[in-house]
């Protein structure tokens, strides 16, 4: 589902991290009429007409909303600390990286001392969803901050898929549990469909039967396997390395809270085995290759 991204109030947006996910986000913000200033590690790869600056502090200077899309907690901490040197009071930092909820809470407290709001706001759906305006956002932070950032978030994603999940850290918890389930389901589907294959049952028939009326239906069985895995397409939509990083954060959270995670750990081990064989730059669906796909 796509939506019209025109019509929201224009805002000054600092955007840090215009990579595979970030660049199409910037495109949508510009198309929506926002005043976007971009900081990227590879500015030469960006369109010449974009406004670019060197450094996170320069991108944040004067911005109403500062968006960041970064690899992990180490980079998030460094960039947010730099952003806070220039961010104006009342600005909202929208941190879209999937990383540690504990680090997010620490950074939110730091931002609060500067009069800056902080949202942990990881996204769900991948690059195709960004381009279609179908991205989901799961936000952790104050309701006021979510409302101030709403024109930016709904320009990038689907307004109906923006969820305020609770205080800072809650958005990341939801994203981590989402990817935990994705990893378990992707791994289990490869093994289950191998049963159909080896038993002589047409695999696509088995998928259609389960997804149209079975309790075992899930998004990996509906989309990943028929559209990517069975076609032998393992180019990265969501990199295996990123999945392993997200699982690491999920397991760290589980350990902090005393929650047992044997199924997730088993899926994580299979993801690690796939990474050893095929590398971390391939799609996470490459875990299916361990089952002969």
Image (cartoon, grey):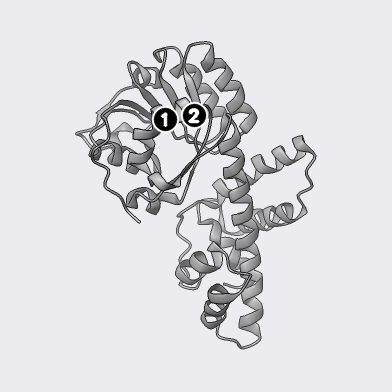
**Is disc 2 surrounded by few (<14), some (14 to 19) or many (20+) residues within 10 Å?**
some
Left or right of 143: which side holds 18? Answer: left
Q: Residue at x 50, y 56 (%)?
A: 282
**Is disc 1 surrounded by few (<14), some (14 to 19) or many (20+) residues within 10 Å?**
few
Residue 67's spot in the image, x, y percent? 41, 30
The total of numbered circles placed on residues is: 2
Look at the picture and state if 68 lies above or below 130: above
Residue 22's spot in the image, x, y percent? 38, 39
The quarter holding residue 257 reads top right
Left or right of 25: which side holds 171? Answer: right
Q: Residue at x 30, y 50 (%)?
A: 3
Quadrant position of the C terminus in the picture: bottom right
In terms of depth relative to the viewer, which is nearer, 206 or 168?
168
The numbered mark at residue 147 is 1
Residue 254's spot in the image, x, y percent? 73, 41
In terms of depth relative to the viewer, which is nearer, 280 or 15?
15
* Mark 2, residue position: 143
Q: Is residue 99 in view?
A: no
Q: Is residue 174 in view?
A: yes
Q: Are marks 1 and 2 in contact (CB under 8 Å)?
A: yes
Look at the picture and state if 289 lies above or below 80: below
- Element type at mark 2: helix
Left or right of 13: which side holds 192? Answer: right
The numbered mark at residue 101 is none
């Amino acid at each position: 589902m796509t939506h019209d991204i025109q019509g929201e109030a224009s805002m000054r947006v600092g955007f840090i991290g215009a990579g595979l996910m970030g660049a199409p986000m910037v495109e949508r913000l510009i198309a929506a009429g926002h005043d976007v200033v971009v900081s990227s590690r590879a500015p030469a790869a960006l369109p010449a007409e974009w406004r670019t600056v060197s450094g996170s502090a320069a991108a944040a200077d004067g911005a109403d909303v500062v968006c960041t899309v970064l690899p992990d907690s180490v980079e998030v901490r460094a960039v947010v600390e730099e952003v806070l040197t220039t961010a104006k009071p009342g600005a909202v930092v929208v941190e879209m990286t999937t990383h540690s909820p504990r680090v997010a809470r620490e950074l939110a407290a730091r931002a609060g001392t500067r009069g800056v709001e902080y949202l942990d706001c990881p996204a769900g759906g991948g690059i195709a969803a960004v381009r279609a305006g179908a991205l989901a956002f799961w936000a952790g932070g104050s309701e006021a901050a979510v409302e101030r950032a709403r024109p930016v978030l709904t320009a990038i994603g689907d307004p109906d898929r923006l969820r305020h999940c609770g205080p800072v850290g809650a958005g990341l918890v939801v994203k981590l549990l989402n990817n935990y389930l994705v990893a378990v389901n992707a791994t289990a589907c490869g093994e289950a469909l191998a049963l159909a294959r080896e038993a002589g049952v047409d695999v696509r028939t088995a998928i259609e039967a389960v997804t149209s009326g079975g309790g075992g239906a899930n998004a990996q069985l509906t989309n990943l396997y028929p559209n990517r895995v069975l076609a032998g397409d393992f180019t990265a939509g969501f990199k295996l390395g990123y999945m392993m990083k997200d699982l690491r954060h999920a397991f760290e959270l589980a350990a902090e809270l005393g929650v047992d995670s044997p199924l997730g750990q088993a899926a994580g081990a299979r993801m690690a085995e796939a990474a050893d064989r095929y590398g971390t730059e391939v799609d996470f669906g490459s875990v299916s290759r361990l089952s002969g796909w």
